[in-house]
Image (cartoon, grey):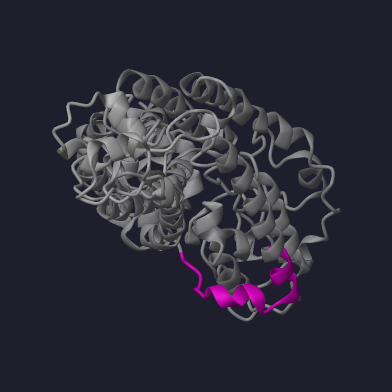
Amino acid sequence: MTQFAQVLAEVGDFGRFQVQLLVLLSVPNILSAFHVFTQVFVVLEEAHHCSVAWVKNHTWNLSAAQQLALSVPLDAAGSPEPCLMFRPPPDSASLEDILSHRFRETQPCEAGWDYPENKPPSLKNEFDLVCERKPLKETAQAVFMAGLLVGAFAFGSLCDWIGRRAAILVQLLVIAVTSLATAFVPSFELYVALRFAVATAVSGFALCHVTLLTEWVGPSHRTRAVVLTQSAFSVGTMVLAGLAYGIRSWRLLQVAGSAPVCLLFFYYWALPESARWLLAKGRVEEAKQVIQKAASVNRRKLSPALLSQLVPEKTASSGNTLDLLRRPQLRKMTLILLCVWFVDSLGYYGLSLQVGDFGLDIYLTQLIFGAIEVPARYSTIFLTQRYRGWLPPPRPPHSLTSHRARPTAIASLSGVSAPLGLGTEGVRRLATGQGEGPGGGAPHLPGGRPVFSPRSARGGHSAGRGGEVCHSCRIHHLLRVLCRALPHHHPADGPGAGGRLLEDGGHPHAAGAPAG
């Protein structure tokens, strides 16, 4: 029997086929930055004051300045109050009474607002997101972030159910339709609803595309491949700065940022399915066709005998999210990871969504933020390789979870697959410890070397593998330590049980910082 790791080595673990796949997946990543941060540029501060109908309806031949002085009070700085107006005088009041400022009682705006600067249409001036409606801006952003959360759970499972390729195509379709429709909404409520739908698809793509990429790339190139595709998101934030600077109308900006997604219709033919996923689903013939195509693009000769021995890969049983809380070690680790990701996301989005509050030009600040992200992402390769000494020494391989203990670990870790960007199957592979070693016991790398060797704990896995992106390497080691800490049971399911979707000990490939 032939495992996919052997076939991938024969096909080429980072040839022209993988480079083409990386480019295909990087393009939507560039476009995703627009959807995540575009709202920052369509709700910029703008001077406004109450729109007063009565002073405009009278034929008193008053200048605009006089109308404003009669209808809107001034603040301490001598500017018109943005949210107050004088109470309208009675119909019997004469012009002399009005000009003498006898009617000085104030009240909130009742007929909308005027925007004297005459700036291009924006969410703020078109839907009046000012005064008591100003919190709606934060509400819209909160709904978008909720969409990211829902998308992680929904599309994380969908990616395992219908396949990586099909899930990505669905996500791109949702992004194209809903983002374009956003440019033509007649109400703010519909805008918020469509933004929620966009967020779910953006979040799902952030998870599924990394899974697809890493299932085609060999372990020695995975880190750099994931960093490169995630750096495309940072490029997108820089492109957004230029796009928002050149197009100030929010509807035109929305069309300009959404239309390129429609040009990706050819992904239906160009995007390959994961051969690993096909094997896990027992679709061996389809997997062979995709593998042969990859070998052809990479200009590698594939042994027919090797391909003919390719067999379906077994998958492990599933569980539910509540399993995360049933074991003390899992509960502890879950809380730690929740804290890490909460702090990381709070800092990243807290700064990125407030680029207008730094006292600099907002477009220049956005450009700087994106430019800083690229070397920051690449630095994670070095940092995760250099600083791993804080991990405790590994236990001997025989203390790893065996088959009877694995279902609980699988069920527990599957619940965090969406936020970690591993995919459910990837987490199952990590939890089960299935590797290249004989009998499906302790995970081994090719050549029979245990994954959890002292060397791997000190500074990396097999030679040339390198670190992972951002938090994912630390999370990977935390989960490895967690699996070793679970009680040991004697195997009962026989050799080879459990799923094996990721090779080389289930090294993860997380999607990196949000999306950025």
Placement of 9 over or under 365, stated as above or below = below
> What span is colored magenta in the figure?
314-333
Placement of 392 over or under 214, stated as above or below = below
Residue at image location 42% in from the left, 52% down from the top: 132
Q: Between residue 103 and residue 461, name the one nearer to us.
A: 103
Residue at image location 37% in from the left, 20% down from the top: 245
Would you say residue 365 sits in the magenta stretch? no
Residue 238, picture quadrant = top left
Q: Residue 287, percent across and down?
A: 33, 51
- Count of numbered tags: 0
Q: Residue 173, percent across and down?
A: 23, 47
Q: Between residue 292 and residue 320, name the one nearer to us.
A: 320
Q: Residue 128, percent across and down?
A: 32, 44
Q: Left of 304 or right of it: where is 513?
A: right
Residue 464, picture quadrant = top right
Residue 486, picture quadrant = bottom right
Residue at image location 32% in from the left, 57% down from the top: 284
Q: Between residue 377 and residue 406, name the one nearer to us.
A: 377
Q: Left of 271 or right of it: where is 388?
A: right
Residue found at the far left of this picture: 59
Residue at image location 41% in from the left, 61% down from the top: 280
Is residue 24 in view from this perspective? no
Q: Residue 27, percent across and down?
A: 35, 31
